[in-house]
Image: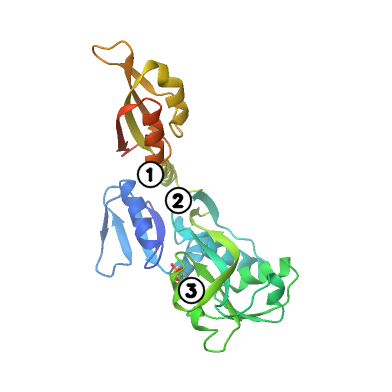
Amino acid sequence: MDEARLKLAVQKSGRLSDPSLELLGRCGLKLSRGKDQLLGFGENMPLDVLFVRDDDIPDLVEEDVCDLGLIGRNVLEEKRLELAAQGRAARFETVRTLDFGRCRLSLAVPQESPWSGLESLRGRRIATTYPYLLGDFLRARGIRAEIVTLSGAVEIAPRLGRADLICDLVSTGSTLAANHLREVETVLESQALLIRTPLPLAPSKAEWMRRLLLRIEGVQQVRESKYIMLHAPRSALPDIRRLLPGSESPTIIPLEGSSERVAVHAVCRENVFWETLESLKQAGASALLVLPVEKMLS
Ligand code: PRP
Ligand code: ZN
């Protein structure tokens, strides 16, 4: 592989795959994927994407096979604890918290099982693919329970009699519902992170890393941002400014043929909901228009 190009590890197929590629696309990256689909070549940036199992991403970054990785906090923290158990410190660094891949590692019991708080865990068997995070959670609360480490299909362990309850990732909750399980306690909140090797990068790579990070920031800001335009009487401006969510100083433009009415243009760094528009209208605004923002660079 070309040493002058940044290498970024991304989950091959799973909850982070599509949003990861979408983020890179919005950062302007054009990828061509070869037949084996394991390596994506950046056509317009010196950046290549390796498609791998999410559990392998921390190791790939640790071992400098990749400079960067897009990974869930759940996988990263499990790895960190696993390394700590071996007396090693993790060598990856988190550089950005991203706005996708939100899910949580939770304890869930069979629908009909009683639950009266963490005390109910004592002496029970808990199936999970996250033995280190679960072990840490139990230790911190002084609870002795048996951890049954599985490599997958955790949600069917109670029905098979292999465990009394489970500790698994939940995002929509549909897997739990389909398996008649009830979420009772959160062990870890998770979302996607960008991690990097702690080793210094060659100057050209470092420069592209810097640019990529700036673009990621821009993309994340823009996702929530809206451009809002409206007409209003001057006298209503103080109220209207208070109602505009997360906006800096708006642009006020006089309207032709009217000394009292003005146009207000503003970037709102939050979503603009119908409720806000209704309040703005009540405050005297009319001709309200909300537009998505495509790119932003400050
Ligand atoms: C997790 C978990 C459940 C599912 C929960 O697996 O093991 O099967 O997601 O999601 P839901 O609440 O939306 O139904 P994941 O897809 O992350 O697979 P992996 O652990 O093998 O990476
Ligand atoms: Zn996985």
Q: Position of residue 127 (x, y in %)?
A: 58, 79
Left/right of residue 150 with respect to residue 276 in the rendered view: right
Toward the viewer: 213 or 197?
213
Left/right of residue 173 with respect to residue 93 in the rendered view: left
Q: Is residue 198 visible?
A: no
Toward the viewer: 201 or 183?
183
Q: Is mark 3 within 8 Å of ligand 1?
A: yes
Say which label, 2 or 3, has the lower sequence index: 2
Q: Do labels 2 and 3 touch, CB within 8 Å? A: no
Name the residue type under label 2.
Asp
Residue on which disc 3 sits: 176
Q: Could you tell me how far apart the alpha carbons at marks 1 and 3 are, in whole angstroms?
A: 30 Å
Q: Which mark is residue 223?
A: 1
Which of discs 2 and 3 lies nearer the camera? The answer is 3
Quarter of the image for the N terminus: give it: bottom left
Q: Which mark is residue 147?
A: none
Q: Is mark 1 within 8 Å of ligand 1?
A: no
Q: Is the image coloured rainbow, by chain, by secondary structure, or in one colour?
A: rainbow
Q: Do labels 1 and 2 touch, CB within 8 Å? A: yes
Toward the viewer: 279 or 251?
279
Q: Which mark is residue 99?
A: 2
Toward the viewer: 196 or 154?
154
Q: Could you tell me how far apart the alpha carbons at marks 1 and 2 are, in whole angstroms?
A: 9 Å
Q: Secondary structure at mark 2?
A: loop
Residue 282 vs 156, above or below: the answer is above
The furthest residue to the right: 142
Q: Position of residue 52 (x, y in %)?
A: 40, 67
